[in-house]
Amino acid sequence: MKKKFNIYCVVMLSAIVLGLSFEFVTGMNDAINGFMDGWNSAAEPNLRHPDRPTTIYEVTLRALDNDSYGYSVRNLKTGRMEPMQLTGIKYKTAGWNQPDGLLEKVGGLFCLVFVIAVVLFWVHFIKLILAVNRGMAFDRAVERRLRIIGWMLMAMFVAEWGADLSFYYAWSGTMEVPGYEVTMGDHPSLMLLLTGIGMLLVSQIFAIGRQMKEEQELTI
């Protein structure tokens, strides 16, 4: 039983590592560009040249009229100009024209909560594996760790939504594109919430199993 449990844990960890590696490789260019944008958006030049656009932002757009294509792009195969819709833009603005500072701080706080939840998730997940391998499958400590893992997954989900909404409302009022509205780019994965609820259910199953084991021992 322990061998199967360890195999499942290795498979889960491998899937997580492969998934993170894939996201890291595919998003490396965006990460580098984002870092350079932040590096180039220093505050000092804004103080010397308050009207010079130096602060860089990216926003996701949605056309108010889905059938409207107000832009065009050249088709290299046919040589024709094809109608095009915008889905997002990157723009520069002056330092004084930055988003709501309070909302950005709230978004940063949610990001901090997300990081803490991730760390606690891994700490308790590793401790859970060690506890089961020591023969403590039906133990209160295992139930507690399962519950903490579940709550941490749900905390990640809430923190992601909080950060995304905070940054969205902070940035949405900084610019306007005729015929478009600013929307949220990425939405938190519902799998975090569902997995967190699933872990809470598993912890309850373990608690029922422990109670049944204790009742059997008292009967004997």
Image (tube, grey):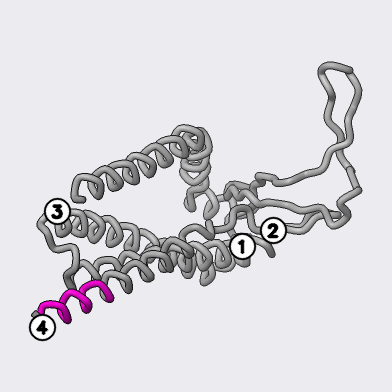
Left or right of 100: which side holds 110?
Answer: left
Q: Earlier in the sequence, mark 2 or mark 4?
A: 2
The answer to the question of whether label 1 and label 2 lie on touching residues, with beta carbons closer than 8 A, is: yes
Q: Is residue 124 magenta?
A: no
Closer to the eye: label 3 or 4: 4
Upstream in the sequence, badge 2 or badge 3? 3
Is residue 52 at least partly visible in the picture? no
Type of amino acid at the residue the image marks with label 2: Thr
| Residue under the point 25% across and 46% down | 4
Look at the image and say whether residue 209 sits in the magenta stretch: yes
Label 1, label 2: how far apart the Cα atoms are: 7 Å
Q: CA distance from mark 4 to mark 1?
A: 58 Å
N-terminal-most mark, 1 or 3: 3
- Give the distance between the C-alpha atoms of the residues marked 2 and 3, in whole angstroms: 47 Å
From the image, tell me which residue sits under label 3: 133
Q: Residues within 10 Å of mark 3 (few under 14, many from 20)?
A: some
Q: Image quarter for residue 118?
A: bottom left
Residue sitting nearer the eye, 193 or 119: 193
Q: Is residue 23 left or right of residue 137?
A: right
| Residue at the disc numbered 2 | 183
Callouts 2 and 4 close, C-beta under 8 Å: no
Discs 1/3, front: 3
Label 4 sits on residue: 218
Q: Main secondary structure of the magenta part?
A: helix
Q: What residue does disc 1 label?
A: 168
Q: Residue at x 69, y 58 (%)?
A: 183
Mark 2 touches mark 3? (CB < 8 Å) = no
Visible in this render: residue 180? yes
